[in-house]
Image: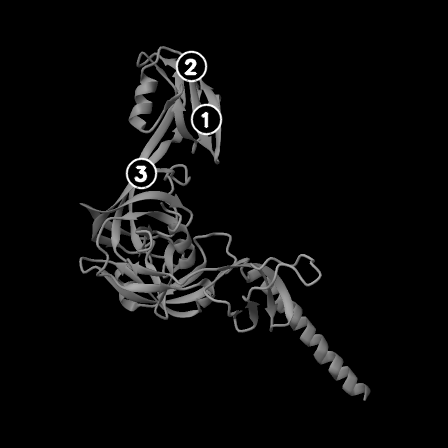
Amino acid sequence: MKKLIRITDGILAVFLVAVLSLVSAGNIFLPDQIYTYSSNTITYNSIYTVDANDYSLVDYQGNERVSPDTKEIKLLGIFPVKKATVTKTESKKVYIGGESFGIKLYTDGVIVVGTKDVIVDGGTCNPAKEAGIEKGDIIVSINGVKTTTSDQVEEIFNDNNGNDYKIKVKRNGNYKTFTLKPVYYSAEGKYKVGIWVRDSTAGIGTVTFYNPENSTIAALGHPITDVDTNEIMPILNGEAVKANVTKIYKSTDGEAGSLSCDFSNDTIGSLSLNSNCGIYGKYTIDVSDKQLYDVALSQEIEKGEAQILCTLDEDGPKLYSVEIVKIYMRSNNDEKNMLVKVTDKDLIEKTGGIVQGMSGSPIIQNGKLVGALTHVVVDNPEKGYGIFAEKMIEMSESVN
């Protein structure tokens, strides 16, 4: 009998350790926010469940209960793991993209991309830096005049007889005003402020989808950042144009390749939002010839076979085989929700795996849009990261 008790205690101890381990793992890796199309039970990895049914805000004694949109994730339907916010939404359908396109962006304000020293009396000084202006600041006005282009800023600074400037900038979402004192540069016989600015950028990417609900175009899955400051470029306005792939520079271990494209004059849409989840705007082309796909929720995505849709030549978008290797339900990076590995030999032969310009390529699994490619793993370009489609859908619905 004692032996039986010891065996039972041992089994129970192992069971409890396993339960605690799974509870701890679930608390770390399971999402804090869940979207669902129904009131059915939601399942993760076959062992974690969430009851999405609504229940009353108060019990029969009038005591406040958990809000209907806050649910308990349980292990095996028994052991509490964590609470998550459950949002019910309608099933979404979008037209899949997959085509390369050109991006033209103009900033809302003028970005400071650097400051430089000015030679004064045999020495040097840095007027902009001394004033407190930093690389990455967005100049929104000078002496009360709104600034929109780098040419305008250059003209204001060149028309100076030594007077101070009141520079209003936006930095990390906050506004600051600095006094910038020009210095006289005798070699050119004029005053200098020692500042470099930029008001626009251009690039290429891949269209992820067209949302017919509000005529929105969504692409990239990651933000466009300034090449010098690495800050997200604030859009005043932008344009998406058709582009033709002219050459492919293959990726190799340690170096990401890229697509080379020629821009056309054919506009496919306007761009108005540059976010952590990609770039967005309004499309202006007929998309009725494209294929309509359901958008998968994150909990529907599985490890295993999938496909990406991208353009590598004049024949337009084609499907290529990939494998979803990992899924990160609680990634702190919106752009890295899943790890994808290219398995298509033809794609590997053409590109070496994933190259710059493929960002935004739709990821399709089980007949649904599950996400978009965002980044290549430089040390292993056959692998790359992707963003959940549900995040891009949510962002696209915020575009007016």
Secondary structure beneath disc 1? loop
Q: Which quadrant is home to the N terminus?
A: bottom right
Q: Viewer-nearest of labels 3 and 2? A: 3
- Corner quadrant of residue 302: bottom left
The CA span between labels 3 and 2 is 31 Å
The CA span between labels 1 and 2 is 14 Å
Looking at the image, residue 276 lies above or below residue 250: above
Residue 115 seen in the current view = no
Residue type at numbered disc 3: Asn
Mark drawn on residue 109: none
Mark drawn on residue 237: 3
Q: Which residue is farthest bottom?
A: 1
Residue type at numbered disc 1: Ile
Query: Residue shown at 77%/87% (left/top)?
Result: 4
Query: Residue shown at 45%/64% (left/top)?
Result: 37
The number of callouts visible is 3
Q: Please give the residue where the numbered disc 2 appears in the rendered image.
A: 164
Q: Please give the residue where the numbered disc 1 appears in the rendered image.
A: 133
Q: Viewer-nearest of labels 1 and 3? A: 3
